Amino acid sequence: IFSSDDVFLGPFPTELPGIHAQCFEDSFSRHEVRVRAMMMGFGQELPEKPTIADYKTRELRVRLMLEEVMEYAEAAGVRVGAGYAQLKFSDLHFRAHAKPDIVAMADAVADISVVMTGTSVAHGFPLEELQEEVDANNLLKIANGSLDEFGKFTKPKDHPQPNFERVLRDAGW
């Protein structure tokens, strides 16, 4: 069903081997269905209603978001620092320090989505196609990936890279 070059082949099935039916609801976008399937495959929980996840899950989500923001900054030629020192993701430290606020978390997630979509628009990127490419690639990790010490599902060294260049060329780059 999935390949790194073909992204997703055919109509999205209501079930995939090892993927629970809770990934598939009419209210979810195709991207959310693929992300939910990936999270289920990685052994992550999919709550049925708004909830404050445990600390380990919250830290993982922060790590994943910051890692991607730092990757974007590097790719965009923007140096992130504190004072004159360049800040790297590996320099960051994470710890619990306050009671989580679910309303503020929802606000931040919505704002992050708007900023991410706006960044894609600012570059003229075909966001849906890029999401399909990365989703298919992430779903391939389920078979051969492993969890790191922080709960991030990592790909093996021989895992194929998403073909973003093809997606950009198809969009006219």
Image (cartoon, grey):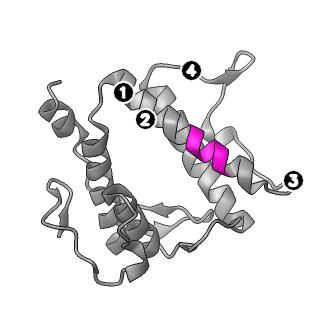
Along the viewing direction, whichever of 100 and 173 lies nearer the viewer = 100
Q: Residue at x 61, y 65 (%)?
A: 149
Q: Which mark is residue 98?
A: 3
Magenta-colored stretch includes residue 110 = yes
Residue sitting at x 43%, y 67%:
36
Q: Nearer the N terminus, badge 4 or badge 1?
A: 4
Secondary element under disc 1, as helix, strand or loop, is helix
Relative to 48, say whether 9 is above or below: above
Q: Which residue is nearer to you in this view: 125 or 151?
A: 125
- Which residue position is annotated with label 4? 79
Left or right position of 134 against 49: left
**On screen, 80 above or below 103?**
above
Alpha carbon separation for disc pair 1 and 3? 35 Å
76 in relation to 162, above or below: above
- The answer to the question of whether label 2 and label 4 lie on touching residues, with beta carbons closer than 8 A, is no
User: Which is more toward the observer, 64 or 161?
Assistant: 64
Residue 6 image-quadrant placement: bottom left
- At horizontal 62% and vertical 62% (from top left) the residue drawn is 150
Image: magenta residue range: 106-111
Looking at the image, the residue that sits furthest to the front is: 27
Dot 2 or dot 4: first in sequence order is 4
Q: Label 2, on which residue?
A: 117
Pointers 1 and 2 in contact (C-beta within 8 Å): yes
Q: Which quadrant, please, contains the N terminus?
A: bottom left
Rounded to the nearest angstrom, the CA distance separating label 1 from label 2 is 6 Å
In this figure, which residue is indicated by the disc labeled 1? 121
Mark 4 or 1: the one toward you: 1
- Whichever of labels 2 and 3 marks the residue nearer the N terminus, that label is 3
Q: Position of residue 62 (x, y in %)?
A: 64, 50
Tell me where residue 40 appears, x and y as whole percent: 45, 74
State the CA–CA distance, disc 4 to disc 3: 29 Å
